[in-house]
Amino acid sequence: MNNYKYIHLLYVPTMACNMACKYCYLEDNTKELETRYSPLETLAFAVDKFKSSQIIPFNISLHGGEVTTLNAEDFYNVIAYIDKYYKDNRNLILNGNFKIGSPHIKTNLYDIEKHIDTIKKFNVSISGSLDLPFSSHDEFRVTKGDKRTLDKILENIKLLEYIPNNKKVSATIFKEHYEKIDEIISDIKFLHENTCLNMNDFNFMIGFEYNSNGLLTALTEEEQVDFYHKIHEAFEGTDLEYGLNNAWFTEFGPDYCTNCNNCGTKFFLLERNGDIYSCVRGQKHPDFYYGNIYTDEVDKIMQTATNKIAKVHGDVGFNDECANCGYLYLCKTGCPFVKKTYNSNKSYTCKLQQELYKDKNYKVDYNNREMVFEYISNMHPNLIDKYALPIIPRDVPNMQSLIVEDPNLKYIYDTECFVLKVDSTEIPLESQIIKLHREFICITPQTKLKIYVKENVLEELADYPENNALYIQLLSGDTICYGDEQRNKQKHIANCMIYKGVLASNKSDKDGYYCFDISNFIKEYSKYLSSEKPNNLFFTTTALRDYHYTKQKNNGYYHIQAINLPFQNIEFTYLELEGEE
């Protein structure tokens, strides 16, 4: 069984840059930081440390700063390492259902000639950046000596002609670019007809106002949609139509990084000094800093990432429009960094995304209550009551009638038998298959958890009550395929049995109930809990459990009604707090 987790790792081997773009999001950080670690040393150390925690980078891409400012030896060593990494870990990556890549760099293309031999040797794929139209490029993208850069970049693109791997460019669109859309269309055609770039693999990105030094203005949502339609009008029916309908606007489709509940579980940017951030957008922003690979344990980095992204989404809240539009399963409300920047609770490209989804014939999920509940459960647990799911009664034979007909089932489903105390709050527990709505709590390492068991329950259906025990089952929210049925069910983590004598010897603060503290039980297995989906705790007794399975065996109607665990339960997320070891 494959128990690995997979991440996309962006590596920044140098913060230095040979250009001084006037709207650079890194501002004054584009200079080499002092560190005793070589570019190769940090990458190799980080990958080994991740792998020792069963976390596999399925993709390693180089970013900056500007990667090509590295000296020839360091550039070669890093590229050779990545090439060997993909070969050595081929089966691991394929087993995670990911493709085997090749070394890849994101570059401004200005000094790429320095490394052209290494690029050719390892078939490095290239993702370059330009401003479109070209007239804007030379206005904003200049060297640190304030020289124009476009002519040299176009010359350098010619050097890529005989490299078999992908070579593409992308352009970020602000209002100042949008106002020159005719020039953009013309320049795309020029690049397609006169360079070796694969313009069917081109990308548009929509800019947002962050560190633009007041030079650029973000498009309104209406302007984004208008830009999208005008580009379509210009290129539909041409030999670039494939790219138009695929890669050009892929940033806004379901395959992009925002299509997950919490991107802090999957995407990481590593700097040469060991610092880890969310991505290029969050780079150097304290709210998107996850720790340092040299000084922090991987588990702590991963938990910090999950917690920080959840906090950003939680701070801006959830928009009811997202619950009702039918596309939440595709967009997941957008990039947390941009949401924080704009203090917005929905994607800054919402209308553009909806246009894209319609054009691609993605299904509008009008019956998406379960999808909404799952998202809320993970990202906005404080809103769980508002979006709780009603449980629709099944056709007869009704479970309630089965319980009435067989009094021995009473305590399996009784709402007074088990009471969970979460810190100072008591929660009477119900069976998950007869309750009218799902219950959900959040647990941290500091949460005090006690389970109260009604004293007479240990006597029920037990020939020898002293041999009877409180039976606790802990399940992860992650699923696994079990048994002959090949049915996906929640992954079982641990069972715990506390016999009647132990329960009776513990002092209880609730009349008529035994009491037992289960805080340490949860902590002991916390590293096996799901970080994305609600986990589950079930409570019964060994005697009641045995009777349940006997009843299932003997009564087909009961078996169908109680095919899932029927015992009193609570669903929960487990959040490590920052600073917890």
Image (cartoon, rainbow, N blue to C red):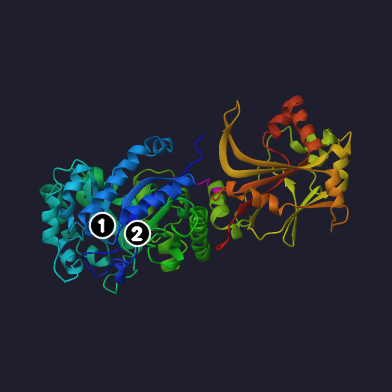
Q: Judge whether residue 180 is colored magenta.
A: no
Q: Position of residue 75 (x, y in %)?
A: 24, 53
Q: In the rendered view, would you say 31 is above or below 366? A: below
Residue at mark 2 to residue at mark 1: CA–CA distance: 16 Å
Query: Mark 2: which secondary structure?
Result: loop
Most extreme residue toward the front is: 36
Q: Amino acid at mark 2?
A: Tyr
Q: Nearer the viewer, residue 133 or 153?
A: 153
Q: Amino acid at mark 1?
A: Val
Q: Residues within 10 Å of mark 2 (few under 14, many from 20)?
A: few
Instruction: Name the residue: 24% across, 70% down.
Output: 22
Q: How many marks?
A: 2
- The residues colored magenta run 364-369
- In the drawing, what numbered circle is on residue 456? none
Q: Are the residues flagged by discs 2 and 1 in contact, CB closer than 8 Å?
A: no
Query: Mark 1: which secondary structure?
Result: helix
Q: Nearer the viewer, residue 513 or 500?
A: 500
What residue would you read off at disc 1? 67
Q: Main secondary structure of the magenta part?
A: loop
Residue 198 visible in rendering: no
Sequence-first disc among 2 and 1: 2
Q: Position of residue 160 (x, y in %)?
A: 15, 47
Front position among marks 2 and 1: 2
Residue 513 visible in rendering: yes
Q: Position of residue 551 (x, y in %)?
A: 77, 29
Q: Is residue 250 left or right of residue 157?
A: right
What residue would you read off at disc 2? 37
Instruction: Name the residue: 72% across, 26% down.
Output: 556
Q: In the rendered view, would you say 483 is above or below 269? A: above
The image quadrant of residue 544 is top right
Q: Judge whether residue 367 is colored magenta.
A: yes
